[in-house]
Structure formats: C-alpha cells, structure tokens
Image (cartoon, helix red, strand yellow):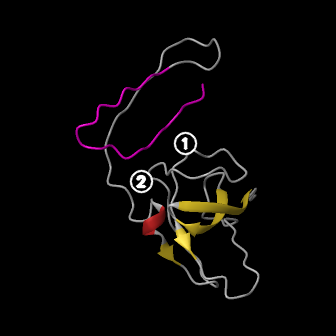
Amino acid sequence: GISSSLQWFGEVGVIYHLRVGGLGQEVGDFGLTIDTFTPVANDQCPDAISVSSDGFIIASTLDSTVPDVPYCGYYVDNSPGVWYYVDGEDKGVRASTCSPRTSVYAVLEVFTGSCDQLYCVTSGMDDYN
C-alpha cells in the first residue's frame, strides 16, 4: 500500500485530532507511529539561512515542519520544507537539487517580499536520474 507521513509544529496546550482513512473507498489495516522531534533551525521563512550564489548545501527536510506559504505553481502546502535566501547580485540565478545526495522528489520555490507577504517568482520540480 501507499503510506503517508505528516509533520507539523505542535503548540503547547493545543489538542490535535488525527484521522486515518483510505484513498477513495479503500479500507484495511494500517500502522500508526507518533513521535516528536525538534524542528530544524530554518524550517520557517524568518529563519532562512543565507547561501552564496556559488554554494552547495547538503541538508534534509526530515525534521522540518509544514510552512504556511502561498501557492507557487505546485501544491506543496502539506509538505515540510526548509528555507534559504540568496542575493540576486543583478545576475541570473540558477538553483537545482539535481545531485546524487537528493533522495526526494524535490520542489523548489522562489519568492520575493517579506516573510509576511511572499510573492511567487518561479517554481519547479527537478527530475534527477
């Protein structure tokens, strides 16, 4: 079967109700694991980490939470992610997750504006083989 995994930042004193169901009319057995983690430092826009325009980063979205971001070409509103920022330097900028280190079907989204009011510039999904 197909499994699901969700991550979010749980606030103290807030009760979260989880519903497990099948896709469409599917019914059957499942296993459910619940655990906690400490989110990575840059899992929210205000905590973005600066990267140089000639840099390479090895990181993970594993312990990140689901950010509240505007639509930017792909529906990834339930997908955990991490944030970085780069100065455009009045040049073309290319970002890619095409690397042997990439183990997820990665979605890249580029925004301008403040973290309170983000505007989509472009987005894409790399198909690295």
Pick the front one: 22 or 73: 73
Mark 2: secondary structure: loop
Residue 63 locus on image (x, y percent): 41, 53
How far is disc 2 from disc 1 in space, using C-alphas? 14 Å
Amino acid type, mark 2: Asp
Mark 2 or mark 1: name the one nearer the start of the chain: 2
Residue 39: quarter of image = bottom left
Taking the spot 24% from the left edge, 43% from the top edge, the residue there is 12
Disc 2: which residue: 63
Taking the spot 48% from the left edge, 63% from the top edge, the residue there is 45
Residue 90 included in the magenta stretch of the image: no
Q: Residue 78 carries which label?
A: 1
Between circles 2 and 1, the one closer to the viewer is 1
Q: Residues within 10 Å of mark 1 (few under 14, many from 20)?
A: some
Horizontal arrangement in the rendering, residue 66 relative to residue 105 (left or right):
left
Amino acid type, mark 1: Asn
**Residues in magenta, as a range:** 1-20
Taking the spot 59% from the left edge, 61% from the top edge, the residue there is 118
Residue 94: quarter of image = bottom right
Q: Is the magenta stretch mostly helix, strand or loop?
A: loop
Residue 16 locus on image (x, y percent): 34, 31
Does residue 80 appear in this view? yes
Q: Which mark is residue 30?
A: none
Residue 57 locus on image (x, y percent): 55, 74
Asked if the residue at tag 1 contacts the one at tag 2, i.e. Cβ–Cβ closer than 8 Å, the answer is: no
**Quarter containing the C terminus:** bottom right
Residue 82 locus on image (x, y percent): 50, 61
Residue 47: quarter of image = bottom left
Pick the front one: 72 or 103: 72
Does residue 125 appear in this view? no
